[in-house]
Amino acid sequence: MKLEDCSKEELIWYIKNRTFTDFNRIESDILFRRIDLTIVKQEEVGEKADKALGKYIELMQPYEGKKYLDIPDAVIKKASEAMKEWKKLTEQSNRLHKQWEKINAQIDNIQREGEHGC
């Protein structure tokens, strides 16, 4: 990784939090920072998804075992919106997890190279 590959925010964070005594660590430091940010974002998205699913369950639970036609249209609409929100957030969480896996693979490669003296 080159400095040009880092975001402005990552460079500012690095300058504020690290000394430039070991330039070889910048790649792993930035990747670990990306991992941390991805985990935080994924946790936030997960909490929102849980709330959306909880809202869906809360709306539909009183009608469990009843015919679909017995459920008021307003309840169906709100439950549908909650389920759409849950699906959207779940997809976002999955993308963040894939991003985490990619970054983690980069870190693994750096560590393997370090073990072999490359």
Image: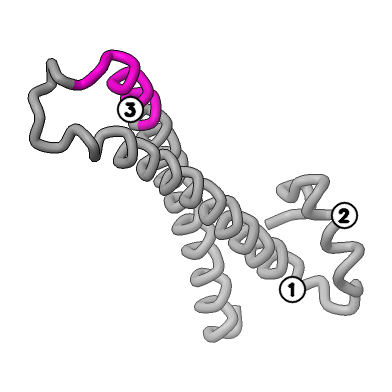
Residue name at image x 57 percent, y 71 percent: 110
Residue name at image x 82 percent, y 45 percent: 8
Residue under label 1, please give it: 25
Residue 77, magenta (yes or no): yes
Query: In which quadrant of the rendered image does the N terminus lie?
Result: bottom right
Decide which of tag 2 and tag 3 comes sooner along the chain: 2
Q: Relative to residue 25, is residue 14 depicted above or below?
A: above
Q: Closer to the camera, 30 or 36?
A: 36
Q: Relative to residue 96, is residue 18 depicted above or below?
A: below
Residue name at image x 75 percent, y 73 percent: 24
Q: Position of residue 33 (x, y in %)?
A: 68, 63
Crowding at dot 1, Cα within 10 Å, few <14 / some 14-19 / many 20+, comes out as few
What's the residue type where badge 1 is placed?
Answer: Arg
Crowding at dot 3, Cα within 10 Å, few <14 / some 14-19 / many 20+, comes out as many
Q: Across the whole image, how many numbered discs are drawn on residues?
A: 3
Which color scheme does this rendered protein use? Answer: one colour
Query: In which quadrant of the rendered image does the C terminus lie?
Result: bottom right
Disc 3 vs disc 1: Cβ atoms closer than 8 Å? no
Q: Callout 1: helix, strand or loop?
A: helix
Front tag of 2 and 1: 2
Q: Position of residue 48 (x, y in %)?
A: 50, 44
Q: Position of residue 93 (x, y in %)?
A: 45, 46
Residue under label 3, please give it: 79
Disc 2 vs disc 1: Cβ atoms closer than 8 Å? no
- Magenta span of residues: 71-82
